[in-house]
Amino acid sequence: MSVMLLAALAVMLAWPVPVLLGRARWVRRAPAAAMALWQSVALAGGLSLIGFPLLWGLTPFGDTVVEAAPAFVRALVEGSWIPLLEHDPWLPTRIAAATLALLLFAHLVLTLAVTAVKTVANRRRHRQMVELLAAPPSQRSRLAEGVSGTPTRVLPHDVPLAYCLPGLTGSLTVLSRGLLDQLSEPEVAAVVAHERAHLRQRHDLLRLAFEAWHRAVAWLPTTAMAQRAVAGLTEMMADDAALAVHDRRDLVRAIVLTGEAGSPTSPTSPPSPTPPPRPSRADNVQGDGSVPLTLRLYRLLAPAAPLPVAVRLLVVVAALCLAVFPLVLLL
């Protein structure tokens, strides 16, 4: 029964659930709750994808994974699995399934580690380039630094640009001279508050996890959908954080004037310190190519009432239950 439930859960979380969640409109009214649900879908989906072949393969060796796993390894080393063929002709297939599950788990962990290492290396190189190219701080850049609460660097470029560089030893907010010249002080403050929210809420870690998940199982189309959805939710959460302390008109005007102000650094490939040409309004995307600007502007210009607290709490509880359910079936 547990194997069948895990298999059914793996199928549901691999296709229909992510598609429905990706099309849901309520997520704009509760991006934090939607983020928790996306995390649980990814976690439960991964556990189910690994768990159902593992549990099916270990069935002859014990009643639970904790009991069967050591017996499985012992049987392979000692060769004691051969006599079991008389009672279970499917045993070679079971061993192959359990081995495949373990290899898939190792693949996921290795992909996450490699993605994290590459990300840290890319950000370190990018930060070094920013430190070399950054202009001496002016009075206005000191204002931006005071607003952000983190070190800020100003690049001598006329193209409006703003992004954040998370780091292990300290984060950095990067602005361009064009941004400071073309935006008013309240608008600059709103943009910096947006970037500060990305850093404070560690959106880079959320996007890193889904980037690794997509790379590990790129053959599954819904992983790309999840990656885009999470990128959009991080933008909504950062916008909400900026709106908590700044005027809506300042943030909207800053987004319209810059085109890509406030876009977070991609987890694996930070933007070049030399900004790209200003995107046309037809491009309609963020600097990382994943978040439609029209969606952000529509949400800011025509805000919907947030979901009731009880509903958001229910979504979070459902997310926790979904994340725990595969573990209960496995253990």
Image (cartoon, rainbow, N blue to C red):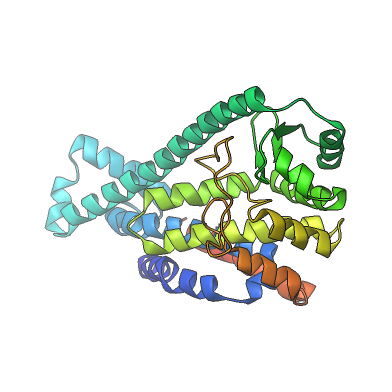
Residue 14 in the image: above or below residue 66: below
The answer to whether residue 328 of the structure is visible from this angle is no
Residue in the picture at 55% in, 40% down:
271
Quarter where residue 85 is shown: bottom left
Residue 39 position in % (x across, y down):
56, 58
- Please tell me which residue lies in front, 217 or 192: 192
Residue 239 position in % (x across, y down):
73, 59
Quarter of the picture holding the N terminus: bottom left
The answer to whether residue 13 of the structure is visible from this angle is yes
Residue in the picture at 40% in, 48% down:
215
Residue 181 position in % (x across, y down):
78, 44
Residue 74 position in % (x across, y down):
28, 38
Question: How many numbered dots are placed on residues in this image?
Answer: 0
Residue in the picture at 37% in, 54% down:
50
- Please tell me which residue lies in front, 3 or 261: 261
Q: In the shown orientation, is residue 50 left or right of residue 290?
A: left
Q: In the shown orientation, is residue 321 left or right of residue 69?
A: right
Residue 207 in the image: above or below residue 28: above
- Please tell me which residue lies in front, 320 or 305: 305
Q: In the shown orientation, is residue 230 left or right of residue 65?
A: right
Residue in the picture at 52% in, 32% down:
122
